């Protein structure tokens, strides 16, 4: 087996964007030289990922592993992270050059909780990724490791394009976090019971993406203060609107009509406006990998596709970043010795 240059981990690798990222890795000699670890909910059912691995034109062999990881299962996250860490220690795989937090869950008119009583969007999109990241920090490449959060404009309650259905028009939705993260974490904020329209689930998804972006600033600050981890970068990339399976739980009109139109138009729109609001997964996969490997795109930056962008003011608020961090320690029950980060408490 040829030695790999480093390890790339992609979560949600059987998804539309996830499998496009894998296809881009496999088809690009520079990226294919890395060892891939692709996590999916269940490796026995990963058709899009297998298709990307088996049918993409390759120019060189690509060492990789497929791992089953449901991000709502905090015990399983601990097991997977321990096995990856042990392999890095044993030099069976190289340190992690890029950790791409891509998995995403979105629901609209339904509401689902995890077995631990958390909102499904909160855990799938944020909490599971936060825990995985904290546990894997010890295996990150200490010179040029990057943690890449797949963000979303949905987090920005003030953005005009994010209000097409009036989901954030009421002043009570303009700010997601006040003095506690618990309503969002436990799914008592924007419940499907209080508002049976699709907007309630969309807002919970938006709140979970907000959490992912709040994590960027706080984690970068803490990593910067740690002498053994301070060269690691944490950044975010908004892939734009893409016609993908994320809408599988959406009402019929959104799922079929709107996304079919988006599907038909996406390639043409990308051709006319390369970094416009509507994108293909292929374009966004390229943007995410470009940000992951560009030596200049580091330290807490945020990108809208291939362009530098700003997160919303709420996502940049250091008080809210710290509040979420403190609460997250409680939600995940992170223990001493589980993370390489010195100032984690
Ligand atoms: N599509 C868009 O317009 C858009 C816009 C902005 C940002 N994004 C972001 O892009 C990323 C990729 O989404 P996508 O559009 O490619 O959607 P997708 O096709 O639905 O892919 C998402 C993947 O995440 C996996 N996933 C969800 N919950 C999980 C969990 N608890 N544990 C493990 N895996 C889980 C899904 O697995 P299952 O199939 O097994 O559920 C799926 O494979 C997400 O972070 C999303 O928020 C998408």
Image (tube, rainbow, N blue to C red):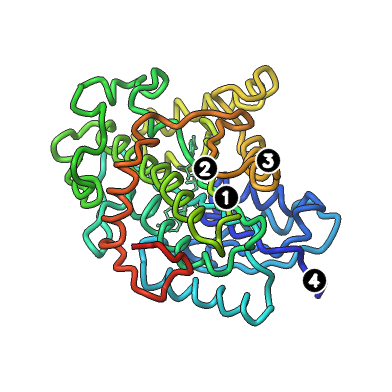
Instruction: Give the CA separation, mark 4 to mark 2.
Output: 31 Å
The reply to whether the C-beta atoms of the residues labelled 1 and 3 are less than 8 Å apart is no
For the residues labelled 3 and 2, say whether their Cβ atoms are less than 8 Å apart: no
Task: Measure the alpha-carbon separation of dots 1 and 2.
Answer: 7 Å
The answer for how far apart the CA atoms under marks 3 and 2 are is 12 Å
Q: Which residue is mark 3?
A: 296
Q: In the displayed image of the protein, which residue is found farthest to the left?
A: 194
Q: Residue lying furthest bottom in this view?
A: 90
**Secondary structure of the residue carrying numbered label 1:** strand
Please give the label number shown on residue 3. 4
Mark 4 or mark 2: name the one nearer the start of the chain: 4
Marker disc for residue 114: none
Q: Which residue is labeled 1 in the image?
A: 233
* 310 to 103, vertically: above or below: above
Mark 2 within 8 Å of ligand 1, using the beta carbon: no
Disc 4: CA contacts within 10 A as few (<14), some (14-19) or many (>=20): few
Please tell me whether residue 53 is drawn above or below residue 107 in the rendered image.
below
Secondary structure beneath dot 2 equals loop
- Residue 227 relative to residue 63: left or right: left
Question: Does label 1 or label 3 sit earlier along the sequence?
Answer: 1
């Amino acid at each position: 087996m040829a030695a790999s240059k480093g390890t790339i981990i992609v979560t949600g690798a059987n998804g539309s964007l996830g499998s496009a990222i894998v296809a881009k890795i496999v088809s690009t000699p520079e990226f294919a030289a890395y060892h891939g670890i692709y996590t999916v909910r269940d490796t026995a059912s990963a058709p899009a990922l297998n298709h990307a691995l088996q049918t993409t034109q390759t120019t060189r062999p690509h060492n990789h592993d497929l791992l089953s990881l449901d991000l709502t299962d905090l015990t399983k996250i601990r097991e997977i992270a321990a096995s990856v860490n042990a392999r890095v220690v044993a030099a069976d795989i190289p340190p992690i050059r890029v950790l791409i937090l891509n998995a995403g869950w979105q629901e609209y008119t339904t509401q689902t909780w995890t077995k631990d009583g958390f909102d499904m969007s909160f855990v799938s999109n944020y909490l599971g990724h936060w825990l995985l990241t904290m546990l894997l920090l010890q295996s990150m490449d200490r010179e040029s490791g990057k943690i890449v959060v797949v963000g979303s404009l949905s987090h920005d309650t003030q953005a005009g394009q994010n209000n097409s259905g009036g989901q954030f028009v009421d002043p009570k939705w303009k700010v997601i976090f006040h003095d506690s993260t618990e309503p969002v974490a436990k799914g008592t904020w924007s419940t499907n019971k209080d508002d049976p329209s699709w907007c309630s689930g969309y807002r919970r998804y938006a709140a979970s993406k907000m959490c992912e972006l709040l994590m960027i600033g706080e984690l970068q600050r803490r990593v910067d203060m740690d002498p053994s981890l301070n060269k690691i970068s944490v950044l975010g990339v908004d892939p734009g609107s893409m016609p993908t399976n994320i809408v599988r739980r959406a009402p019929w009109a959104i799922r079929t009509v709107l996304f079919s139109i988006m599907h038909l138009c996406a390639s043409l729109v990308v051709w006319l406006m390369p970094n416009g609001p509507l994108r293909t997964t292929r374009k966004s996969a390229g943007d995410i990998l470009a940000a992951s490997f560009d030596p200049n795109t580091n330290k807490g930056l945020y990108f809208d596709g291939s362009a530098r962008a700003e997160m919303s003011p709420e996502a940049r608020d250091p008080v809210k970043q710290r509040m979420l961090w403190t609460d997250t320690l409680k939600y995940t029950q992170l223990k001493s010795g589980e993370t390489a980060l010195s100032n984690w408490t």
